[in-house]
Image: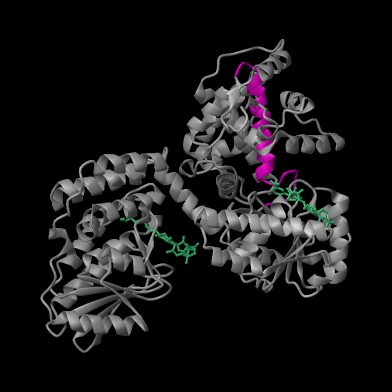
């Protein structure tokens, strides 16, 4: 039973129970319509409370039904039926009232919520717009300006703010059910309020829609849903209810079938699957109540802030007293930045900083639950750190390395109780970037792996399990991206053409701009290490730039020239000359944006397929999350693997074959050919 009805004297309590989040499945929609009919017909009922069991109010339409034809009763009709009820319905909200859930609440005569509840219309984040009156009723209830913010931004608001906006009628203290029944008892005596659908939309100032359109377009970049959502609110403000509903529904159905919506849905489910690898089902993580970070440089300071922000007291260990001071200053600088950007108050920043302590004495870690190492990328230095940790930490303390490229198995040699060791690869800046690659070694115990996943949840980040190889998932693909970008330069493209093509695809920055920002020296260091291992990394132009100390913005020049104090990249004649020398004798061609994007992206997909075949990544969707959350791949493209599948893997193989025959890429790997035959990467799942 998804809906049950109880009676409390003259008040009926309709309880929705459709775990996990009370999504509006067909069965639930049907049950709600039947409940309205039953209660309308019951003369003993004077008012109705609509409440939900479990962790939340109705969290929206059932997203898993979106790929299929809509089944009646359709949600707009369900909401209309509730709005037309003969008795006042009171939505009693806890957890989240999102999307269709809020639309159902807007059909009710009243809305009450507990203070911790949140309400919103997040549809644009799924590439769609509200489809059951959200854009039409909301401006009638709270005015067009507030409606535009909620609908085009997609972020929910807390109950208090919702009350201030007029979105809900009361914030209730104490027990929600009892409070809502009392509220319903009061309103049962009053005449039914005017339904939202028959209210007028308050007028807007001249020029409101034009400036809203500019603001929304600037923020949405290439995502289509926010502007379509704005158009729907505008329509609702300029025409009658029925016309506006028809316009909204048409837009909703159109977007529901769009490529962007499919991509964003894919990411939605990928983000929810990633934190729960099947092998950890039923495994209890170790307690993490205190944490330490070794090394207070770029990464260590960011990791310390991330841990502290998640509520853990943090000890920062550095080499000596002066380094401790520098490390703590790095953490302080992060908090000062947050205060400056308005992300937190000075008081909160001070309080956080007060429980980040520093020292150079490993003895401070005798009772710490979790230690994350972020010292120099040097095997000997890291091993020495873990040797000390092995001697001072509790045998059950979890020990982690943040290495980017070293082999965690090699780092863990000599660690006592090696089952408590794993890789936790943060991305820079660690207190902001959402991605964390979790890298078990040959000896990592399952409960330690589970501790890594639990930590990432506590940090509010996205965990992806990665196997051990050079660069794990993300940086291994990055190496291919950069090599391809250089291949293009040697065959006639320019750095600015490559960067422009990748921005046109939707990336925030092209590969050359990104290297100039981060510094070319880091990759040069990795290539040196790779050559020492007998590998032959391909970066002929980058090597020459590093040889003349063109390391990027920090040295006023890299792939581009920079004027002092100006970050705008200017094409460089010096770089063009080096490219021309390196390209001498190679066939040149004319590149357009689409071909450039293919020559960068499809080899990424090829490498990612190898990663999947080798089980370095467990799911294609995990690779998508790595690229979206670690490298700025556009979310609305769904990640490289979704992009490739949506485009058609046979076409991907054909384009790669052509690039390979021109000497511009590796040929498709066997796994990619197999996946193309099956039409999906799931064919590679073992
Ligand atoms: N449809 C189907 N499944 C959903 C869902 C939805 N709307 N929302 C969440 N789920 C599933 C998740 O996939 C997950 O499933 P799993 O356990 O099998 O992996 C499970 O519910 C729990 O989800 P979370 O891990 O996200 O749970 P949290 O407690 O962390 O968060 C939440 C709860 C805040 C409600 C969060 O799930 C959320 O934001 N959900 C999406 C809400 C949303 O986007 N609603 C709008 C839908 S579109 C719509 O309503 C269109 C309408 O206008 C017609
Ligand atoms: P960094 O050079 O900024 O900081 C390293 C810090 O470690 C320095 O403050 C140094 O004093 C300290 N340190 C060195 N030896 C120590 C010891 N024995 N005991 C205590 N402290 C010691 O380096 P960064 O960039 O923070 O990198 C640290 C680690 O994180 C490396 O393994 C790197 O590969 C990895 N990493 C770096 C990323 C980045 O973007 N910078 C991203 C992800 C991982």
Question: Which residue occupies 12% across, 79% down?
Answer: 190
Is 210 in front, or is 283?
210
- Where does residue 16 sit, x and y in percent of width and height? 33, 73
Question: Which residue occupies 52% across, 27% down?
Answer: 501
346 is higher (above) or lower (below) than 428? below
Query: Magenta stretch: residue 534 in it?
Result: no
- Residue 370 sits in which quadrant? bottom right
Residue 664 left/right relative to 113: right
Q: Main secondary structure of the magenta part?
A: helix
502 is higher (above) or lower (below) than 215? above
Residue 210 left/right relative to 587: left
- Residue 441 sits in which quadrant? bottom right
Point out the residue furthest to the bottom here: 9
Question: Which residue occupies 65% across, 69% down?
Answer: 354
Q: Is residue 6 visible?
A: no
- Where does residue 499 sit, x and y in percent of width and height? 56, 28
Counting the numbered discs, the total is: 0
- Where does residue 416 sit, x and y in percent of width and height? 86, 67
Magenta residues, start to end = 466-493
- Where does residue 589 sit, x and y in percent of width and height? 59, 13
Q: Is residue 412 visible?
A: yes
527 is higher (above) or lower (below) than 59? above
Q: How is the image coloured?
A: one colour
Location of the N terminus (image quadrant): bottom left
- Residue 317 sits in which quadrant? bottom right
Query: Magenta stretch: residue 492 in it?
Result: yes
Is 103 in front, or is 657?
103
Residue 109 left/right relative to 379: left
């Amino acid at each position: 039973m998804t809906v049950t009805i109880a009676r409390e004297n003259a008040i009926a309590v309709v309880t929705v129970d459709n775990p996990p989040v009370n999504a509006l499945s067909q069965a639930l929609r049907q049950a709600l319509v039947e409940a309205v009919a039953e209660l309308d017909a019951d003369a003993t009922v004077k008012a109705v409370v609509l409440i939900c069991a479990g962790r939340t109010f109705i969290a929206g339409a059932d997203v898993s039904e979106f790929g299929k034809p809509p089944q009646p009763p359709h949600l707009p009709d369900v909401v209309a039926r509730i709005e037309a009820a003969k008795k006042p319905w009171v939505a009693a909200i806890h957890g989240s009232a999102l999307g269709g859930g809020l639309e159902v609440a807007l059909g009710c005569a009243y809305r009450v919520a507990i203070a911790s509840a949140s309400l919103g219309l997040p549809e644009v984040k799924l590439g769609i717009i509200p489809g059951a009156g959200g854009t039409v009723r909301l401006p009638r209830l709270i005015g067009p300006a507030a409606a535009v913010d909620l609908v085009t931004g997609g972020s929910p608001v807390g109950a208090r703010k919702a009350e201030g906006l007029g979105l809900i009628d009361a914030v209730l203290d104490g027990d929600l059910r009892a409070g809502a029944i009392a509220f319903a008892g009061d309103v049962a005596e009053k005449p039914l309020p005017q339904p939202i659908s028959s209210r007028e939309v308050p007028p807007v100032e001249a020029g409101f829609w034009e400036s809203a359109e500019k603001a929304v377009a600037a923020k949405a970049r290439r995502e289509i849903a926010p502007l379509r959502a704005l158009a729907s609110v505008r329509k609702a403000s300029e025409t009658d209810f029925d016309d506006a509903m028809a316009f909204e529904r048409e837009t909703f159905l159109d977007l529901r079938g769009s490529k962007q919506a499919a991509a964003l849905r894919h990411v939605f489910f990928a983000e929810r699957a990633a934190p729960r690898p099947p092998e950890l089902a039923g495994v209890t993580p170790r307690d993490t109540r205190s944490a330490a970070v070794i090394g207070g440089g770029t990464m260590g300071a960011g990791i310390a802030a991330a841990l502290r922000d998640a509520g853990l007291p943090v000890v920062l260990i550095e080499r000596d007293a002066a380094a401790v001071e520098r490390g703590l200053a790095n953490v302080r600088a992060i908090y000062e930045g947050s205060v400056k950007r308005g992300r937190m108050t000075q008081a909160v920043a001070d309080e956080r900083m007060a429980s980040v302590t520093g020292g150079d004495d490993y003895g401070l870690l005798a009772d710490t639950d979790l230690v994350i190492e972020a010292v120099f990328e040097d095997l000997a230095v890291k091993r020495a750190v873990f040797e000390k940790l092995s001697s001072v930490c509790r045998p059950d303390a979890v020990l982690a390395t943040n290495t980017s490229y070293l082999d965690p198995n090699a780092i863990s040699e000599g660690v006592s109780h090696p089952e408590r060791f794993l890789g936790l690869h943060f991305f820079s800046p660690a207190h902001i970037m959402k991605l964390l690659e979790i890298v078990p070694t040959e000896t990592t115990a399952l409960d330690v792996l589970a501790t890594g996943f639990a930590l990432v949840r506590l940090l509010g980040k996205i965990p992806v399990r990665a196997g051990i190889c050079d660069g794990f998932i993300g940086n291994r693909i990055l190496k291919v991206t950069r090599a391809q970008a250089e291949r293009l330069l040697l065959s006639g493209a320019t750095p600015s053409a490559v960067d422009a093509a990748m921005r046109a695809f939707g990336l925030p920055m092209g590969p050359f701009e990104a290297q100039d920002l981060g510094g070319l020296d880091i990759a040069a260091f990795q290539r040196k290490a790779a050559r020492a291992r007998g590998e032959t990394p391909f970066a002929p132009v980058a090597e020459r730039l590093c040889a003349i100390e063109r390391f990027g913005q920090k040295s006023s020049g890299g792939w581009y020239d920079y004027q002092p104090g100006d970050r705008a990249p200017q094409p460089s004649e010096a770089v063009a000359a080096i490219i021309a020398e390196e390209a001498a004798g190679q066939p040149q061609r004319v590149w357009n944006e689409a071909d450039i994007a293919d020559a960068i992206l499809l080899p990424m997909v090829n490498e990612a397929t190898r990663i999947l075949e080798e089980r370095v990544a467990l799911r294609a969707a995990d690779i998508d999350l790595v690229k979206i959350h670690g490298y700025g791949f556009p979310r609305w493209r769904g990640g490289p693997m979704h992009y490739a599948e949506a485009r058609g893997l046979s076409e991907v193989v054909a384009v790669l074959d052509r690039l390979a025959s021109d000497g511009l890429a590796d040929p498709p790997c066997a796994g990619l050919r197999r996946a193309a035959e099956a039409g999906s990467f799931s064919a590679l799942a073992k």
